[in-house]
Every structure is written in structure tokens, then in C-alpha cells.
Amino acid sequence: MAYRWKNTLTENDVTPEGVYMNRRQLMAGVAGLGLVGMTGAAQAQGDVLEPSAWDDITGYNNFYEFGTGKEDPARNAHMLTTEPWSVQIDGMVDRPGAYAFEDIMAQMSIEERIYRFRCVEAWSMVIPWNGFELRDLLEMAGVQSGGKYVAFETLLRPEEMPGVSSPVLDWPYVEGLRMDEAVHPLTIMATGIYGKDIPNQNGAPLRLVVPWKYGFKSIKSIVRITVMDEQPLTSWNKSNPREYGFYSNVNPNVDHRRWSQATERVVGGGLFSKRQPTLMFNGYEDEVAGLYEGMDLVKFN
């Protein structure tokens, strides 16, 4: 069983948005886990994380259900209805059912997590999420002993999601994690950014965040979670398995078929900012490398 992440924050520790927006350095009680590690254009493990600007986080997105352009989600996601919302939890669990979003939130402890975000397209941000550990949700449903994987499914509502008219992917969007990845304390279900409700284009009202994996693993607007004993299908792996592996851990030593993953462009860094080196497991190597001990990280990419 992975260690338990302990939140030492109180309401008095919450940083006002104005402070965030002024890009003041934030520590927020994560130093003890080595979760700090990047400051704007210059990053290295042990430095301080500096969150990206709200406009960058919410205005530059991949959410193909609303279009393939980076600005399409922010332009089109207002059509998405997020109330009421429920999540079907089924498969190998003791208490399957459709859980209302409000009922889930009533049982979860919301925390602030400042994580690096690294896209497979080689751009990055730092995002101050609000959310709860996925492990708590799985415990609420009661994972049975044979459960080895967790599958996720995004909402499919064509009348509100103009992008699904395009055959770019086989809808609905699906993702999956191995059970030890799912219950790792770094893995959260995000419900907010900068202390506000998470915007539709970022995956409202509930999305996965796995900070050591490429961003497309962090599936948005989740409507179904299934515990199973076999590795689930995932959208990008189904679409192009040569370019997108099931694990998709951030690895600067394994290039994408069409571009290098050794460096990244920080969104909001300006036209003349230099690309910065990408960190193994996106800077969370100390926390998660043990999950993959003995595995060939080129083969299982």
C-alpha cells in the first residue's frame, strides 16, 4: 500500500488568487514530499513551483470533444451542462451505483495540490488543483480483491460537444490506470483550480490528475469508473499504439515517434523563452519510480 499524503494546510494557509496571479512563490506544505520543483522557465527538482497564469491554464487546452484547436475548448465548452452530474462506479466493487457529484463531494476531503503538467506535445504548465485522492473514492465504492485496473470514461453528449462530430478518436474518450497507480497518493480527482470550480474546458466537474504521466492520461469530465481485472482499452492507445503507450509516463529518454521528449516549452513563458529539460516522471521520480521497478520503460512507455 502506498504511503498516505498528509495535508498540513488550514484555511489560514489558503493563498489568495491575487497572490497566485502575481506569481509569488508557493510552497503550500508540499516540500516534505518533494512535490516542489519548477520555477517558471528554470526548473529543477528542489526549486519552488510557481503556478501558471489562470488565462494560460484555462485558455490553452486539449479537450477534443470541443474541438482540436487549443482555443476551441474555452470557446465551446460553455455548452456543457454539468448539473446534475453523476458518476457510475461499477465492475469489481462492493457498492456499485450511480453516485451523485454532490454526494461524492460530501464524503471527500478537498485539498490543494500544486502539480507540474506535461503534455505529450512537449508543452508544460504548473497548475494549482483542488481535489481529493482517487483512493478515497475507490475506498468508498469498496474495491474487491481481484481488482487490478481502473478504467475511466468521459461524458459523450454530442449536442453539447461539437468536436465529437469529428472521427479524430473513437468516442467516448476512455482511459485507464493500474491499481497501484490509481491508489497512489499523488493521483487525485480534481474539482477546482485556484480554489474555484474547475472550468468546463479543464474537465468539469470532475477529472483525473496523474502528474507523472502525460496529460492525456488525466481524463476529463468523468462519468464512469470501472474496476476490472484486465488492462482496459485507452483512447490514444487504441488510435495509435505505436505513438501512445498504455503507461505514458513522462520520460525524456523515450521520444515520441515524431518528436523529442527531452525538453518542453512552458506555456506563458514568452516568445523568447528557452525550452527547458524535461524531468523523469515529470519531476516525481522519487515518489513513483518504485511502481515500475524491473520494467523496461522503453517497452512499457
Image (tube, rainbow, N blue to C red):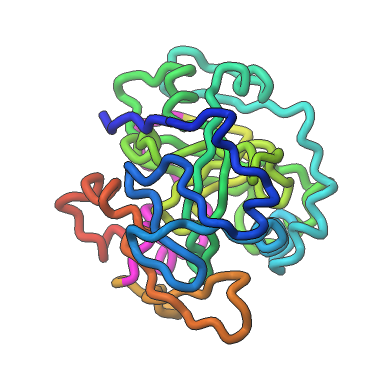
Q: Is residue 279 left or right of residue 156?
A: left
For the point 47% across and 57% down, the residue is: 49
Residue 166 visible, this orientation: no
Q: Residue furthest left?
A: 294
Q: Position of residue 151 (x, y in %)?
A: 47, 38
Is 8 part of what is drawn in magenta?
Answer: no
- In the image, residue 93 above or below residue 198: above
Is 235 part of what is drawn in magenta?
Answer: yes
- In the image, residue 158 above or below residue 70: above
Q: Is residue 277 left or right of residue 70?
A: left
Camera-side residue of 73 and 92: 73
Quarter-of-image position of residue 153: top right
Q: Main secondary structure of the magenta part?
A: loop
For the point 36% across and 53% down, the residue is: 247
Residue 144 visible, this orientation: yes
For the point 48% across and 62% down, the residue is: 118
Q: Residue furthest top?
A: 95
Q: Position of residue 73 (x, y in %)?
A: 74, 58
Q: Is residue 72 left or right of residue 264?
A: right
For the point 38% across and 74% down, the residue is: 277
* Extent of the magenta region: 227-252
